[in-house]
Image: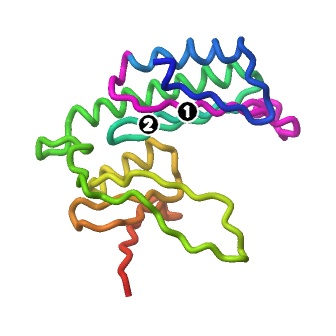
Amino acid sequence: MEDKIAIYGKNIEISDRIHDYVIQKIGKVDRFLQDIDEIRVDLSHMKNARNAADRYSSQITIRGKGYILRTEEKADDLSAAVDSSMDKMTRQIERFKGKRARGRGDGTAVHQTIPAEMDHSIDLEKEEAPRITRHKKFAVLPMSEMEAIEQMQLTAHDDFFVFYNADTAAINILYKRSDDTYGVIEPEIA
């Protein structure tokens, strides 16, 4: 399990003590989820945080077959931030496993519905200004709009979520509106 865990630091040196503490905490996740592909832990320290309780941040991202779970917590101590984010991740896993046990309704798992010939490459044209500083590639999984809302909540992406709508066979963007309802953007090629 330890080979699937990657620990990164921003404005903080990842000492052996910190590394061992994180591995000890995160290493227990495989008891709950067996199909984990990768666990990423991002630890950061902000010297100039307005609130002393927000100086250390711990973000945990778990990627598996058909799901992404993410939590982020801040605290005045690094170990407290790791503990809080792990507690939150445990609650998310329990919630996710409950929904996952109920299934898609048609008896197939989400990762089994991905077409084998699906092209994962993104070809973007680079411009001089404005400058693009980051490109991100990810697998888009077929799911219903309700499953997209659940994934949006599980990944803590509060603004938007891109998904492949299994009902319409098209890429859609789910977004949260100011009145706490959701909207779906259905792009069309003109």
Q: Residue 68: name its quadrant.
A: top left
* 72 w.r.t. 151: above or below: above
Which quadrant, please, contains the N terminus? top left
Task: Give the label on residue 123, or none.
Answer: none
To which residue does mark 2 refer?
A: 63
Q: Residue at x 35, y 80 (%)?
A: 188
Q: How many marks?
A: 2
Q: Residue 101: name its quadrant.
A: top left
Q: Badge 1: few (under 14), some or many (20 or more) residues near its Cα, within 10 Å?
A: some
Mark 2 / mark 1, whichever is N-terminal: 1
Q: Which residues are magenta?
A: 31-56
Residue 141 on the magenta span: no
Q: Who is closer to the viewer here, 33 or 36?
A: 36
Residues marked 2 and 1 touching at CB (< 8 Å)? yes
To which residue does mark 1 refer?
A: 40
Q: Residue at x 72, y 27 (%)?
A: 75
Identified by mark 1, the residue type is Arg
Horizontal arrangement in the rendering, residue 92 relative to residue 111 (left or right): right
Q: Position of residue 71 (x, y in %)?
A: 54, 35
* 97 w.r.t. 173: above or below: above
Horizontal arrangement in the rendering, residue 98 relative to residue 52 (left or right): left
